[in-house]
Amino acid sequence: MSFKHLARRTWLQCLVLGAIGLAVQPGLAATFPERPIKIVVPFAPGAGTDTMGRLVAAKLAELLKTPVVVENRVGASGALGAQAVAQSAADGHTLLLVAAPFTTVAAALPGAGYHPLNGFAPVGMIAQGPLVWAANKALPANTLPELLALARQRPGALNYGSAGVGGVNHLVLESLKARTGTYITHIPYRGIAPATVDALSGEIHLLTGTITALAPYIRDGRLKALAVTSQRRSSALPQVPNMEEAGLPGFDVLNYFALVAPRGTPASVVQTLNAALAVVVELPDVKARLALDALEPSTGTPAALEAFLLKDFEGWKPVVKQQNLKIDAF
C-alpha cells in the first residue's frame, strides 16, 4: 500500500471516529457496538446483494473495530430476511442490506409481512444504478420503440422473464406496460440467472437485470441491449440509450443498495452507523468496486434515505393498482 493511500485511509478513519464521537449521547451509544454486528442479506450467497453486503461488512468492521458478519436469510423474494430484522432487537447490532425488491415486494404483495418504513429505521444509502432492458438476439427489434411497436402488433405474443413476482424486474415491466398500453406476458423465475439462460437460448424474448449481470452477454452479442431504465446513460454501457432517448421521458427506475435497522433503534446509534457508512462509500477501493458493478456511490442522511424509500414505495403502488396485479403468494 502506498504512503499516499495509507495517509488517506488514516484520515478517513479519523474522520469517522470524529463523526461517531459527535453522534454519541452519554449513556446511550457510548458503548456501541457492544458485540459483533450482523448484516442480514435476504438473498442467496453469490448474488449481487450478497456481494454488496460482504463488501460493506468488511469495511465497517475495520472502521468500527468490531466483527461484522453477514447472514443470508433467503426466501419470499427477500421478505423473510426483512421480517427477521424488523423483529430483532432495536439496538443497532442487527441490520438489513436492502435493494430495490425491499420496496417493490412490499408495494406489490399484501402478504409481504413487513412495511419498508413502519418497521425500520433507515441508516444510509450506499449506491444506485439502472437496470438494462435486454432482448434475445433473434427478436426482430433492436430498440425499445421497435419492441413496443412489435408488442402492439402482437398483444400477448411477446414474453418477459423476471427474477420473481413483485421484484423490481417484474414491476419495471408492468410500469412499461402501463405507460405504453402494451401487453407483454410475464414469466416469473426463481432468480435472474435462470431467466437469463432462457433469454440466451431464445425461450423468452425480454428481461431486465443489473448491468453487471447482463453486460457480458450484451458485449459478446448474445443479448441485445435496448435501453437502460434510467433518465441518464450508464458509463458502463455508454452506447445504450436512456429512457428519454428511447421515447419515455420521466421513466426512471434505479436499483439501490442501503442499510436499515429495526424501527426504534436509538438515533445516536443510527447516526454512528450512518457516519461509518458514509466513510465506507468514499473509500477508493469501494468506489472502484462500485464502478465495476456499474453503480454510483450515493451517501446521505437517514432522513434522506427515508424520503427515498417512501417515494419509491408509494411510486410502485399505482402501477400495481393500474395493472390489477393480484399477487397473493411468493
Image: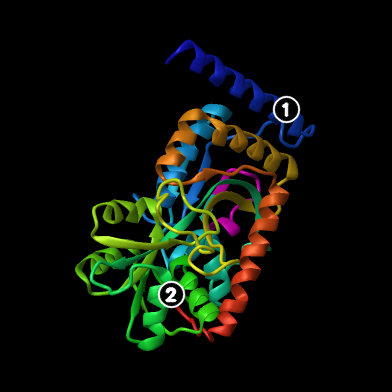
Q: Quadrant of the C terminus?
A: bottom left
Q: Could you tell me which secondary element the residue under label 1 belongs to?
A: helix
Identify residue for label 2.
330
| In the depicted structure, whether residue 249 falls above or below residue 60 | below
Q: Could you tell me which secondary element the residue under label 2 belongs to?
A: loop
Q: Residue furthest left?
A: 201
Q: How many marks?
A: 2
Image coordinates of residue 266 in percent, x first then y, are 73, 45
Residue 119 makes an appearance in the image = no
Taking the spot 44% from the left edge, 46% from the top edge, the residue there is: 294
At label 1, counting other C-alpha atoms closer than 10 Å, the crowd grade (few under 14, some 14-19, many 20 or more) is some
- Splitting the image into 4 quarters, where does residue 43 fall? bottom left
| In the depicted structure, whether residue 297 falls above or below residue 310 | above
Taking the spot 51% from the left edge, 69% from the top edge, the residue there is: 247
Front position in the image: 303 or 215 = 215
Specify whether residue 145 is painted magenta.
no
- Splitting the image into 4 quarters, where does residue 156 fall? bottom left
Q: Residue furthest right?
A: 26
Circle nearer the N terminus (1, 2) = 1
Specify whether residue 89 is painted magenta.
yes
Identify residue for label 1.
21
Taking the spot 37% from the left edge, 87% from the top edge, the residue there is: 153
Q: Which residues are magenta?
A: 83-95
Front position in the image: 172 or 136 = 136
Image coordinates of residue 166 in percent, x first then y, are 48, 72
> Which amino acid, by three-letter code, is at mark 1?
Gly
Image coordinates of residue 104 in percent, x first then y, are 54, 68
